[in-house]
Amino acid sequence: MKYYPICLDISNKLCVVVGGGNVALRKIKNLLKCNAKVSVVAPDVIPQVKNLSKSGRIKLILRKFKKSDINKAFLVISATSDKLINAEVYKIAKQKGILVNVVDLPEFCNFILPAVVRRGDLTIAVSTSGSSPAYAVKIKKELELKYGPEYAVMLEKLKNSRKKILSEVKSQVSRKKILKELWKKL
């Protein structure tokens, strides 16, 4: 299947994670990095998930998944080892028109999550369209070595320079030329 790559703004949007283990924790942390409002539903959770709840970073619902848990959700991730729950989450989310990802089951997803390298505002995503997530992670690790923390600093400088150029230089042709010259210097 071919996926349409996008970067999605989930800040202040309700994102529900069904499951409370290590895989769910990884998904929760990534959602929090993007300023999502995270709600977690699971009968049992690992201590790190409980700690996120105690600190007020997530809402934790300690029970089995119910259909109503995703009523106002923008996005749902099911990260359980229970195939029946995963299938139910997918079915309900799909019926409600909610974005849904069931971890490691592309057939139960209307979106998949790439392996991601972040350096400040720089985001590099790698996907194998579900063919081999482990290979995507291998490529991600190679990219992490190539694109170090200095790229976050460089991009911050570019962002500030671009704002200034956009506000001070009226000609689009001139702006483009100045920006290209700026990129060459960095």
Image (cartoon, grey):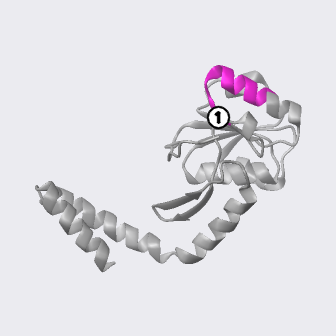
Q: Residue furthest front?
A: 1
**Which region of the structure is painted magenta?**
88-100
Q: Residue 136 in the image: x percent, y percent?
A: 67, 60
Q: Residue 93 in the image: x percent, y percent?
A: 68, 26
Seen at 26% across and 67% down, the residue is 161
Seen at 30% across and 76% down, the residue is 184
**Horizontal placement of 121 versus 140: left or right?**
left
The reply to whether residue 184 is in sight is yes
> Total of numbered circles in the picture?
1
Q: Amino acid at mark 1?
A: Asn
Quarter residue 152 falls in: bottom left
Q: Residue 71 in the image: x percent, y percent?
A: 65, 23
Does the magenta segment cover residue 99? yes
Q: Which residue is mark 1?
A: 110
Seen at 64% across and 34% down, the residue is 110
Give the position of the C terminus as an image quadrant: bottom left
